[in-house]
Amino acid sequence: MAFAWKGTLAAALIAGSCMVSQAQPAGDWQAGAGEDWKRILAAARREGTVSAIGSPQLATPFAEAFKRDTGIELQYIGANPADIQARISREAKANSITVDVVLSGASDLTSLLPGGLLNPVRPQLILPNVTDAKHWQGGAIRWADNAGQYMLKGSRYIVGWPVVNADMIKPGEITSWKDLLKPEYKGKIAAFDPRSGGPGQGVAAYLADRFGIDFIKQLYIGQDVRYATNPRQLVDWAARGTHPIVIGSIQSVIEQYRAQGFKLVVLAPQDGPGYLSSGFSVLDQLKGTLPHPNAATVFINWYASRAGQEVYARTMLEQSARLDVNVESIPDYVKPKEGVNYPDTYSEDWYVKVRPGVSKAVIDALGGR
């Protein structure tokens, strides 16, 4: 699921980043580094800067923390996923690279990766803090690509849950997705628009794969679901009671409203507890002559370390793929539960083989844009 939200995402969420992204001491994230690392770090400091592109929320916290930990300036370009994809595709195909590191979703699995336009990231992972498998979920560094070389996943968390306004809907009344088909909920449900790329289509594709396309029609069409294209608007509808049940919302916005006292409850339907996403955390690098190659390697290692992952997780409220990153502000409903089999929508097998078919079926069933 590559989040292709409109530019309003930045306006909707950027204020909230200040609330959850306060810089914390990094600790000795370079512990055990050898001579190769020291040479690269020295060369990176001579380069003086590194450039990255990704979610606007990360701009300030990343720039401040990376400078604090390395002494190197970070030139961060904040953009929505569609603009990120357009820019890096243009640069990769023209072999004119201006961005050292890319942080986005999984779209490159179907575009730049099969075209041979990505540089391997794995060989650049040097620090013991990063390469030691004991620090990672499942005992291994997490990758979106099957080769485990190009697209590093910083986070792995659960999405795809409905949210209700508990002042209007008793959470215990909805224990399964099929409960949403009850007549009393008609006209009371809103969703992030499932007809275009984004969290709405991600949930719809998950539901279509799980329950079939007829369920999609019964839910979205039969229940008169209203569509939103702005993540804040969707949660606001639930908070104000305009549509007390919403699908495809984002945890950072939910938590902002909960902090204001709104009784929003995230449900975990027994027949569909959600799926694994990696949000904006997928790091890759364009193939070609980079503007700051040594500083890029330093950034990659810092990002994959506990120091970098703590900043990312605190800012985005996404559960890190590292086991030693524990951020209290991350809500429990995004944390994978032991013993639950969640489909991983940020795997090459799902994204390339499954997602296109179910997404097309969803769009066709709902009449396109």
Image (cartoon, rainbow, N blue to C red):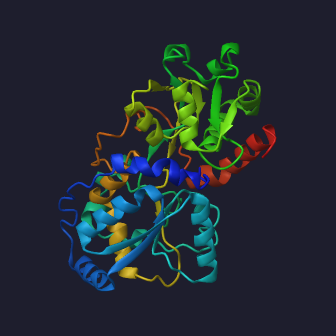
Q: Residue at x 51, y 14 (%)?
A: 170
Taking the image as shown, residue 125 lies to the left or right of residue 3, namely: left
Q: Quadrant of residue 88?
A: bottom right
User: Is 133 on the left-hand or right-hand side of 151?
Assistant: left
Is 38 left or right of 20, judged from the image as shown?
left
* Foreground residue among 124 and 23: 23
Percent position (x, y) of residue 6?
62, 53
Answer above or below: position of 7 versus 254: below
Residue sitting at x 55%, y 13%? 173
Horizontal and vertical percent position of residue 35: 21, 80
Could one spot residue 338 in this view of the protein? no
Q: Nearer the viewer, residue 256 or 186?
A: 256
x, y percentage for residue 74? 36, 71
- Asked whether residue 57 appears in the rendered view, the answer is yes
How far across and down, in percent of the image, does residue 210 sit?
64, 33
* 349 shown above or below 270: below
Residue for point 58% across, 36% down:
234
Based on the displayed image, in which of its 4 quarters is residue 328 positioned? top left
